[in-house]
């Protein structure tokens, strides 16, 4: 048993994962691990990483994109400390905005960063001032609080924020002070993969990438988060609000420029009435040259930035800052990016969006992952591992796939090849057929079950015909943390009579939620959640085809299948859970999709009623 392992028993399959982690770290490489739920990924990775880091005098970074995973990591470290007696110092960092004691609702990204920077530099942040001196050292009282944090052991960010609120101190600065000596730093992806944030953090903590052991949890989300971080948009809505600001605060020169910018977007927005999707490619040069005819491009950015700084002295948010940020980003590289103008219906009028969209996460991840000492990228849906190795640009990677540790007899997996959400087959008649299947499945699967559709539009069109005595729970596109918690609480409470969750693959409830035991007895994946065949998708496929000769797979097929498996993974969360997973679309039997499925226990059958009755009848008995 390794010294930092927090449990009494190593599970079957977990022993192999631990061995592979030890081998990978010793070889100073990166393990790309497809490891299903229940294998004990977090405990294994932290135990091996801590032992190795202690021996080699390294620091451990545990990065995840979900706040719930922070809690799992903290709980693991607390358990480790209790069981082994090993004292492990830890700092839990979430986004600075989420740790801020000011009212910053509505401020996002650069807007919050600029607001924070401005009030700190002016000495107007009372919370910061109670932690840091003028020379940015720790105040005497803050040193005592940090000492208290170290002695308390691993604390979740919410526990730290409560302590910060009690002391009227900046939670982020307290966490940063604790991170200075912490053996484990838990944080979001961008703490490492956003170049500016990483440079600032590592400089403050006096850490080198080469001395870091990296654990990336839920790694299937990493490519998307990186490309989203490197992308930027300019919308007609932003320009309208920017104009309002410029008029309100007396910048007549900017009013004229912003009006010209709006006209330039309109100039490019010439679409045929026959086009279903109104979008077109725009080159960097043609957009810049249009602006340069009105005003010098760099001067425009400079003036917008200056005005935004002045406006933020009077209000927290400035749209002019977002416009300036976009124009700065637009000057970037062409390789690995798509530049697209699109028109979408708006509440009162169509909205134009000019996008500078990143296609290649490897632009950021490849050089960074080359520098770290060693690491592991892990997820229950990291298939195929070679795709993630390619997309992230991992040169010294070791790929491993692990089987599920759960008893196979506890799950029935069925592909029902009788309906389809394929675009050219969509009709009211098909929606009725799919809804009839869903209604039947609702009666065959006792208790709670969840349906995951490719989109909200398809969900609504099909569910209109869904007939079930069970209570329906409709997921909404925009849900706050509190909304989600209340939604799940109400759904759980319905388990005796049975509830039906009507969700969307890749949305709020298709990932990161646990409904153990009899809280969820079945999941039905309705149709394939393929990306819209729009310009960006086509650009992505073409780019991956040129770079990897796998454009269709990497840009279209595999991402859709991973969404299906993420949705399906909500059903069986422990070795005692029992349930049914249904894939409802004939395309799941097509070779290019079928090859993605784990084959253990999978059946393709139209006799699903008999199979489900047998399964749930046996489980009841």
Image: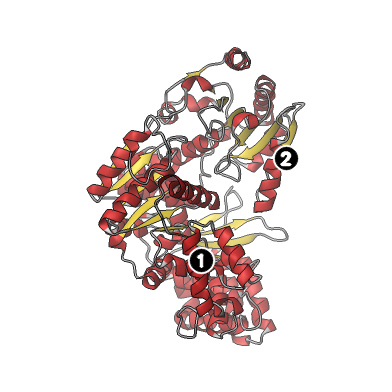
Residue 490, disc: 2
The image shows residue 519 at horizontal and vertical percentages of 64, 32
Q: Residues within 10 Å of mark 2 (few under 14, many from 20)?
A: few
The image shows residue 140 at horizontal and vertical percentages of 50, 79
Locate the C terminus by quadrant. top right
Residue 464 picture quarter: top right
Residue 148, disc: 1
Q: How many marks?
A: 2
Q: Is residue 552 left or right of residue 343?
A: left
Q: Residue at x 43, y 54 (%)?
A: 63
CA gap, disc 1 and disc 2: 39 Å
Locate the N terminus by quadrant. top left
Find numbered disc 2 in the image and state the secondary structure of the residue it sits on: helix
The image shows residue 407 at horizontal and vertical percentages of 47, 23
- Vertical side of 303 occupied by 144: above or below: above
Q: Is residue 349 left or right of residue 547?
A: right
**Residue 92 shows in the view:** no
Residue 514 picture quarter: top right
Q: Nearer the viewer, residue 303 or 345?
A: 303
Q: Residues within 10 Å of mark 1 (few under 14, many from 20)?
A: few
Dot 1 or dot 2, earlier in sequence: 1
Residue projecting furthest to the left: 27
């Amino acid at each position: 048993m390794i010294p930092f392992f927090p449990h009494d028993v190593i599970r079957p399959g977990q022993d192999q994962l631990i061995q592979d982690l030890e081998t990978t770290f010793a070889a100073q490489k990166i393990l790309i691990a497809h490891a299903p739920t229940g294998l004990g990924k977090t405990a294994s990775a932290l135990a091996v990483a801590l032992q190795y880091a202690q021996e080699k005098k390294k620091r451990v970074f545990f990065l995840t994109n979900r706040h719930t995973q922070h809690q799992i990591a903290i709980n693991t470290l607390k358990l480790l400390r209790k069981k082994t007696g090993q004292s492990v110092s830890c700092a839990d960092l979430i986004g600075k905005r989420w740790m801020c004691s000011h009212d910053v609702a509505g401020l996002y990204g650069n807007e919050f960063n600029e607001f924070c920077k401005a009030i700190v530099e002016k000495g107007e942040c009372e919370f910061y001032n109670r932690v840091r001196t003028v020379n940015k050292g720790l105040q005497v009282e803050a040193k005592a609080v940090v000492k208290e944090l170290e002695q308390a052991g691993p604390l979740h960010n919410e526990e730290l924020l409560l302590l910060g609120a009690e002391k009227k101190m900046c939670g982020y600065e307290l966490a940063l002070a604790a991170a200075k000596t912490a053996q484990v730093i838990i944080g979001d992806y961008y703490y490492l993969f956003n170049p500016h944030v990483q440079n600032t953090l590592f400089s403050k903590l006096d850490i080198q990438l080469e001395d870091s052991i990296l654990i990336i949890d839920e790694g299937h989300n990493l490519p998307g988060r990186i490309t989203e971080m490197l992308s930027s948009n300019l919308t007609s809505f932003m320009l309208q609000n920017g104009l309002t600001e410029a008029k309100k605060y007396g910048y007549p020169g900017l009013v004229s420029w912003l009006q010209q910018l709006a006209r330039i977007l309109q100039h490019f927005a010439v679409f045929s009435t026959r086009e279903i999707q109104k979008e077109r490619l725009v080159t960097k040069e043609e957009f810049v040259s249009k602006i340069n005819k009105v005003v010098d491009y760099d001067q425009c950015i400079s003036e917008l930035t200056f005005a935004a700084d002045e406006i933020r002295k009077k209000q927290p948010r400035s749209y002019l800052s977002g416009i300036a940020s976009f124009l700065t980003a637009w000057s970037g590289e062409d390789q690995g990016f798509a530049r697209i103008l699109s028109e979408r219906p708006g509440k009162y009028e169509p909205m134009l969006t000019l996008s500078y969209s990143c296609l290649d996460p490897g632009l950021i991840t490849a050089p960074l992952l080359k520098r770290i000492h060693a690491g592991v990228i892990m997820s229950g849906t990291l298939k195929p591992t070679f795709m993630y190795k390619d997309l992230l640009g991992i040169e010294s990677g070791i790929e491993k796939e692990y089987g599920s540790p759960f008893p196979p007899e506890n799950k029935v997996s069925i592909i029902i090849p009788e309906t389809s959400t394929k675009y050219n087959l969509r009709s009211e008649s098909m929606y009725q057929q799919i809804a009839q299947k869903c209604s039947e499945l609702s009666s065959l699967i006792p208790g709670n079950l969840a349906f995951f559709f490719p989109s909200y539009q398809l969900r609504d069109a099909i569910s209109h015909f869904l007939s079930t005595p069970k209570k329906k729970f409709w997921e909404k596109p925009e849900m706050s943390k509190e909304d989600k918690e209340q939604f799940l609480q109400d759904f759980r409470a319905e388990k005796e009579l049975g509830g039906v969750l009507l969700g969307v693959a890749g949305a709020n409830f298709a990932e990161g939620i646990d409904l153990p035991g009899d809280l969820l007895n079945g999941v039905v994946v309705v149709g394939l959640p393929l990306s819209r065949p729009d310009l960006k998708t086509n650009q992505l496929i073409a780019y991956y085809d040129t770079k990897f000769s796998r454009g269709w797979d990497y840009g279209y097929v595999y991402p859709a299948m991973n969404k299906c498996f993420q949705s399906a993974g909500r059903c069986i969360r422990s070795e005692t859970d029992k349930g049914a997973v249904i894939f409802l679309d004939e395309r799941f039997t097509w070779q290019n999709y079928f090859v993605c499925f784990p084959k253990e226990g999978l059946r393709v059958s139209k006799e699903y009623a008999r199979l489900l009755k047998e399964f749930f009848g046996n489980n009841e008995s």
